[in-house]
Image (tube, rainbow, N blue to C red):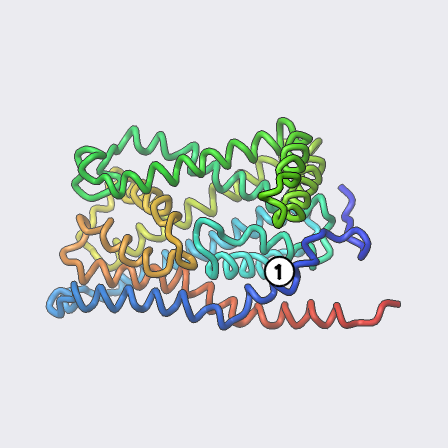
Amino acid sequence: MQKTSLTPDTQSPLDTEGQSVLRSLRISRMILPVTLGLAAIGYLIYTKFDAEQFRSIRWSAQAFGWMAGALGLLVIRHFFYAFRLRTLTGDVFSWRKCLQLMVLWEFSAALTPTNKGGPFVMLFVLTRERLAAGRTAAAVFYAMVCDAGFFVLSLPVLLAVYGPAMLYPGAKTFEEVWVASGVFFSTYAFMCSYWCVLVFFLFIKPRYAKNALGWLARRSFLQKQAPRLLRLGDEFELAAGEMRGQSWTYHLRVIIGTLGAWTCKFLMINCLLIAIVPTTPIDGVTQAFVYARMVAMFIIMAAAPTPGGSGVAEVLFATLIADFVPAAGVAMVVALVWRSMAYYGYLLLGAFIVPGWVAKMLKRDEAPVT
């Protein structure tokens, strides 16, 4: 496939919102999620901390070995995502560039509520990297299809195997944990709905997307959103055109990247739990159950209105592993280590990478046209 790039007159209309997107990537926006996360940890320490239980944690070589394994899975996860992005962009970008762009993706997701994430920021980012319009749209929307599909297709199987206990420790029926069940099934239903819409518009009837969004744009009550709806219809059409005719190896590589990334994301939590709570059984049955519960946790966490689920994730995680730890204070330690690696780590990386990227984009805009 030919490696193409956008010229100024064919750039995505998303460029008109460039300043808004750049503001969303400001380092100062880290203050809110970090504050919420620290407040949640502080709450857990104040209400659950037990000094004796904390001293009982054995920081042995074996514990640090499992923690190193968790960190290794986090790195491998990042490479899986970079592999997927490189495939989606037609190998236009180098491995180094894809790794950098994935930091931008994760950083933008960490600064927005979990149910929004960073895909639409990435539409702007990839466009600014001079990626062809169709390839940009395909990369973002196909990634959304794959990420949502991972949960839409795997959760019914996991629920059939583990039942209500997957949503809350010791639960026998969904009714006795109605809050967790309600949030879980509502979020899953929403995810399933938009996954079906994306699949239909991208792979089955892409023309319908443009027509439907154009019809919505003509409604008076959506007048303010009309430009965005029309642009989204164009993006769907471009994405569908880009993916039409792709080889089966292209799709296989994208699926492998998705499965690898999400599997590493949840298995790293297994490693951290074993590291800090050495009494955790290492047999496959127990570890598969922990994995399933972490998948369910992410669905519940996706409903959180805070940036990156900050504050909610820490408390929810400590609650969901309560039956595997000797005390709530120990669960708090596991939650803190997990979030430090998987969430605050990306905030830190983004703080180093994002300013340089933004400065580069601004410098390019200010350069005279020759």
Q: In this picture, is 68 found above or below 161?
A: below
Label 1: few (<14), some (14–19) or many (≥20) C-alpha neighbours in 10 Å: few
| x and y, in percent, of residue 278 in the image | 20, 55
Can residue 340 be seen here? The reply is: yes
Residue at 27% x, 59% y is 334
Q: Is residue 301 left or right of residue 42?
A: right
Out of 150 and 256, give the one closest to the viewer.
Answer: 150
Residue at 55% x, 64% y is 24
Q: Residue furthest top?
A: 204
Out of 216 and 68, give the one closest to the viewer.
Answer: 216
| x and y, in percent, of residue 210 in the image | 67, 35
Residue at 56% x, 32% y is 199
Q: Which residue is mark 1?
A: 96
Q: In which quadrant of the rendered image does the C terminus lie?
A: bottom right
Q: Residue furthest front?
A: 220
Q: In this picture, is 62 found above or below 221?
A: below
